[in-house]
Amino acid sequence: MKLKACLIFNPVAGQGDPDVDLETILTILSGCADEANPVEGIEIEVVVTTADCEPGELAKAAIERGAESIIASGGDGTLSAVAAALIGSSIPLGIISRGTANAFANALDLPTSIPEACESILAGGTKVVDMARCNGLPMVLLAGIGFEAETVNLADRESKNRLGMMAYVLAGLSQLRNLEQFEAKIETDDKIITVLASAITIANAAPATSILAQGGAEVVFDDGLLDLTIVTSKTALGAIATSYDLLSSTLRGEASQREDVGFVRSKKFTVTTTPPQKVVLDGEVIGTTPLEVECIPNGLTVFAPKIEEVQPTEKLEGLPNLTIEDKG
Ligand SMILES: Nc1ncnc2c1ncn2[C@@H]1O[C@H](COP(=O)(O)OP(=O)(O)OP(=O)(O)O)[C@@H](O)[C@H]1O
């Protein structure tokens, strides 16, 4: 057995059967999933979360007990809390998503199925990604002002259980009726921008489905910078057209060309608004503007699948008596 890890497991996350999920995880991580070809497994201590525990505190306590790595399994709430506790440490974090949106794994290009996530942890490859701090709180993915904050507020636990991802879509559609613009002053590393906005999103990392973060087509999670997207749509119809454009341009890997979308990168942003707007941080409403967000470059180490090397399509050098004639 190698590497002593602590698995922090949320039994109520997502819509799957937690007993089956836990057994699958432990079987794969023990190295015995393939009976014919067992591999060296990981020694694991399992800590099950409770309704009133703080998963980050569980992670810190496990490290004090000697855990060499932490594995978190649950929804984005559990994963973000554990990641936040590991910012600035070199303790690698394994991410096994079992939530509704699985934004955390999607944003960092990590596997979202339980078997694939476990296999990449077992293989031991890691990568280093940026983290951020928003109004003094740890931020893994993004902070939203305006439209997105209202949407998250409306997608409650009960509707997420019933509807899964649709809860966010329906909450977003119903929120369009109340779309309101606000005055925003945005300070970057080198400029001050004032604008009339309906949504502002500051992302460290974001899945393609977080369309309000996608003005610049790609949120790069290891460039030491944050990506800010401004949406200024005035009407519900305009917001639908903008959302559709952001989704389709992201899927094409292109930046939005719409006049009601703007984007800018910076290591740090300060945003003030009139009137004050709700702020959602990694899926939770944390209060209202103003807000200050700063990137923490290389803030977290995560287990990640090894990038497959591209095989060269041609190699002739070194062959004996080699001549190569250009046919012109
Ligand atoms: N044993 C438990 N019993 C009841 N609630 C729990 C327990 N463990 C954790 N929780 C609650 O689970 C919530 C965190 O859930 P998490 O975000 O991981 O999953 P999720 O809500 O399904 O994910 P998503 O946000 O992607 O939908 C916290 O509110 C926490 O209080």
Image: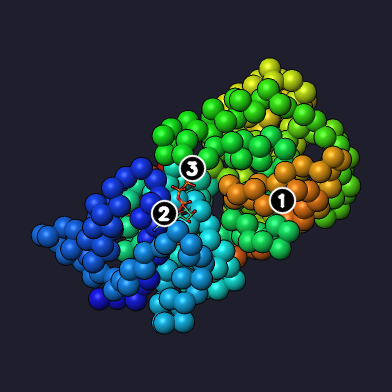
**Gap in Å between the C-alphas at discs 2 and 1?**
25 Å
- CB atoms at circles 3 and 1 under 8 Å apart? no
Of badges 2 and 3, the one in the foreground is 3
Q: Mark 3 highlights which residue? A: 157
**Gap in Å between the C-alphas at discs 2 and 3?**
14 Å
Q: Which element type, helix, strand or loop, lies under badge 1? A: strand
Dot 2 alpha-carbon crowd within 10 angstroms: few under 14, some 14 to 19, many 20 or more: many
Seen at 66% across and 25% down, the residue is 176
Query: For the view shown, which residue lies furthest in the left direction?
Result: 36
Q: Which element type, helix, strand or loop, lies under badge 2? A: strand
Please tell me the numbered disc located at residue 287: 1
Residue 260 pos. (x, y %): 76, 27
Horizontally, residue 14 falls left or right of residue 26, namely: right
**Is label 3 within 8 A of ligand 1 (CB to nearest ligand atom)?**
yes
Horizontally, residue 35 falls left or right of residue 22, namely: left
Which of the two discs, 2 and 1, labels the residue nearer the N terminus? 2
- CB atoms at circles 2 and 3 under 8 Å apart? no
Seen at 32% across and 57% down, the residue is 118
